[in-house]
Each structure stands twice: as C-alpha cells, then as structure tokens.
Amino acid sequence: MKDISVHYVEAGSGPETIVYSHGCLMSHRMFDDQSTALSSSARVIAFDHRCQGDSEKVQTEFALQDLVDDAAALISETCDSPIHFVGMSTGGFVGMRLALYKPKLLKSLALIDTSADHEAP
C-alpha cells in the first residue's frame, strides 16, 4: 500500500489463496479458527483495515473506497493470481466493491452478515 501500512498475517500454502476482511471495530483475529482450519490446504491471508487492529492509525478522514483500495493493493502485492475473498460486515462492503471495480483480482466472493442495500448520500 502506497500511503498506509496495513497489517496482515499469512499462513499455509496451496494452489488457492483465501483473503479475509473483517467487520468494523474488529481485526484479522476474528478469522483465526477459519485460517487454522484452511491453512493445511490453502494459503490464507487475514488483514486489518486501516485504523483497526494492528494496521496504521491515520489522522486524516478516509472513506470506504480507501479500504477497498488498501485491499486491492494488498492482494496485488502479495498474490500472483485471483483469490477467494471472504468479507464480514464492512469486509463484505469491501469485497463487493472489489468485485465491481477490480474483478480480475477475485476468483470468488463470500459475504458474511453484510448488505448490498443502497447507501445514504
């Protein structure tokens, strides 16, 4: 990521890569059990959104699109092929926008407790 340090953890290896994106006020740790279970057969990456978990705390305002850009940069920098993206709540918002704006980064998208409802202006 060019303007921010995004913390991530990586485990396992295999032909497929799964990237986890957490909900608001959470961290990559919410996916520890899933990462442990799947890391025996896949590469697993779980990251913290900016200003959450162990990622850099910024002092400037940012929007959801900045989180999408962070995720896209992380995927582009760490993965050679399309990935399976799993997003919970805010992470789901990020995943849907990745699918819309950067579809070549994704092989699949799993959404957990999120919404595709229209957002207020």
Image (cartoon, rainbow, N blue to C red):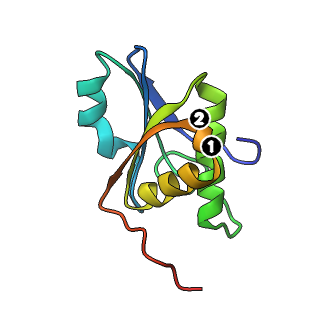
- Residue 51 lies left or right of residue 89; in this view the side is right
Under circle 1, the secondary element is: helix
Q: Is residue 57 shown to the viewer in this render?
A: no
From mark 2 to mark 1, how far is it between C-alphas? Answer: 5 Å
Disc 1 target residue: 72
Q: Quadrant of the N terminus?
A: top right
Residue at the outermost bottom position: 121
Q: Is residue 60 shown to the viewer in this render?
A: yes
Residue 44 in the image: x percent, y percent? 40, 27
Task: Give the residue drawn at x 58%, y 25%.
Answer: 79
**Quarter where residue 46 is shown:** top left
Residue closer to the observer: 121 or 3: 121
- Residue 4 lies left or right of residue 98; in this view the side is right
In the rendered view, would you say 112 is above or below 63?
above
Q: Report the amino acid beneath label 2.
A: Ile
Under circle 2, the secondary element is: helix
Task: Give the residue drawn at x 71%, y 67%.
Answer: 60
Do the numbered discs 2 and 1 sit on residues whose CB atoms are within 8 Å? Answer: yes
Disc 2 target residue: 75
